[in-house]
Image (spheres, helix red, strand yellow):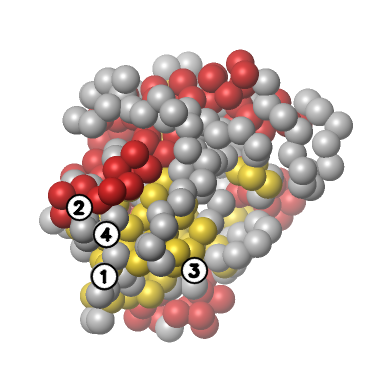
């Protein structure tokens, strides 16, 4: 098991390598025919604004957890993961080990489907807001009387559009079918529900509730692949099982700690972001590392 890098990396610089894309958290580079290298930096975005401070070990946790799940479910769900061993990377990238070690993956290139595949097992976030207003989530009618954090009888598939800027927007099943076609939409729904259920059951045995999560799928030739990150604190709500109680917000292993701090300020949620105090940065890092440790049984330090 690779060890956590203590230095914080907020931007990558790989002279000679072709930058494929730079997102809120990930920098992606071309790595030869049909392959990419995906690097998880320590950047953190809250309310769609990237904070000025990086979160120690965050990129490492995102990458190592994704690798963990890709390997666990690789026989059941085809995915884009090829290797996280730098010896397998193109020779031109190997001099950048200080930016790649532990926080990057060599992956197969795929064309992402234009829909985020969100699965919810509990009522929280935007789903809670919609339920309080309409009694539905993404057009799915739910029982009356649910409260914040209530567990659903069965997980629900609540897709969203993929926004390059701003918030993703929830869409109905009918809109999903219109976007993807019925056959592909049904496959992505069924894959996502199956994968969530398997991961939820595994995590429950490790003391973590996966309240909801977001999967991305892509097409490579005739194959549908699970891509991007998977089941991390950035793409999921992880709650501790101990002390879980519906009717109130739950503690979480993610950046909610940062969001709560920012909500306490008079900030308009537009750039530039306010500085994060050192204790908020460290507490957030601790939550990411704790999620990794509980789920994998490995010590991240």
**Which residue is at 45% across, 34% downward?**
58
How far apart, in angstroms, are the residues tagged by discs 4 and 1?
10 Å
Nearer the N terminus, badge 3 or badge 1? 1
Marks 4 and 3, how far apart in space? Answer: 34 Å
Dots 2 and 3: beta carbons under 8 Å? Answer: no
Circles 3 and 1: CB atoms closer than 8 Å: no
Task: Count numbered badges in the picture.
Answer: 4
Instruction: Classify mark 3: residues with Cα within 10 Å, few (<14), some (14-19) or many (20+).
Output: many
> Whole-percent x and y of residue 167?
65, 57
Tell me which numbered mark, 4 or 1, is placed earlier along the sequence.
1
Instruction: Say which residue label 1 marks.
Output: 32
Q: Helix or strand or loop: what does disc 1 sit on?
A: loop
Numbered disc in front, either 4 or 1: 4
Residue bearing mark 2: 83
Q: Quadrant of residue 200?
A: top left
Q: Which mark is residue 115?
A: 3
Work out whether residue 217 or residue 286 is closer to the camera in this orientation and state it: 286
Residue 229 appears anywhere in the view: yes
**Image quadrant where one finds the N terminus:** top left
**SS type, badge 4:** loop
At a point 56% along the width and 76% down the height, the residue shown is: 175
Q: Nearer the viewer, residue 175 or 294?
A: 294
Q: Earlier in the sequence, mark 2 or mark 4?
A: 2
List the residue tagged with mark 4: 92
């Amino acid at each position: 098991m690779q060890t956590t890098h203590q230095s914080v990396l907020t931007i990558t610089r790989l002279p000679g390598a072709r930058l494929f894309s730079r997102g809120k958290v990930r920098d992606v580079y071309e790595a030869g025919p049909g392959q990419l290298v995906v690097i998880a930096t320590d950047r953190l975005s809250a309310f769609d604004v990237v904070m000025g401070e990086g979160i120690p070990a965050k990129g490492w946790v995102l990458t190592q957890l994704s690798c963990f799940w890709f390997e666990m479910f690789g026989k059941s769900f085809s995915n884009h993961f090829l290797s996280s061993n730098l010896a397998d990377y193109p020779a031109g990238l190997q001099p950048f080990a200080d930016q790649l070690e532990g926080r990057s993956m060599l992956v197969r290139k795929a064309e992402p489907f234009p829909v985020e595949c969100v699965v919810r097992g509990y009522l929280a976030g935007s789903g809670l807001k919609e339920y309080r207003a309409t009694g539905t989530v993404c057009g799915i009618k739910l029982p009356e009387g649910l409260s914040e954090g209530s567990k659903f009888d069965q997980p629900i598939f609540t897709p969203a559009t993929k926004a390059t800027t701003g918030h993703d927007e929830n869409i109905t099943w009918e809109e999903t079918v219109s976007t993807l076609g019925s056959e592909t939409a049904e496959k992505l729904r069924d894959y996502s529900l199956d994968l969530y259920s398997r991961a939820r059951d595994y995590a429950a045995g490790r003391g973590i509730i996966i309240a909801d999560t977001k999967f991305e799928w892509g097409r490579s030739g005739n194959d549908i692949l699970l891509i991007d990150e998977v089941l991390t604190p950035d793409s999921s709500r992880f709650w501790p099982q101990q002390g879980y109680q519906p009717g109130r917000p739950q503690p979480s292993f993610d950046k909610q700690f940062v969001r709560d701090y920012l909500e306490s300020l008079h900030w308009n949620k537009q750039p530039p972001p306010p500085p994060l105090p050192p204790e908020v940065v460290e507490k957030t890092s601790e939550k990411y590392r704790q999620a990794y440790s509980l789920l994998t049984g490995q010590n991240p330090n």
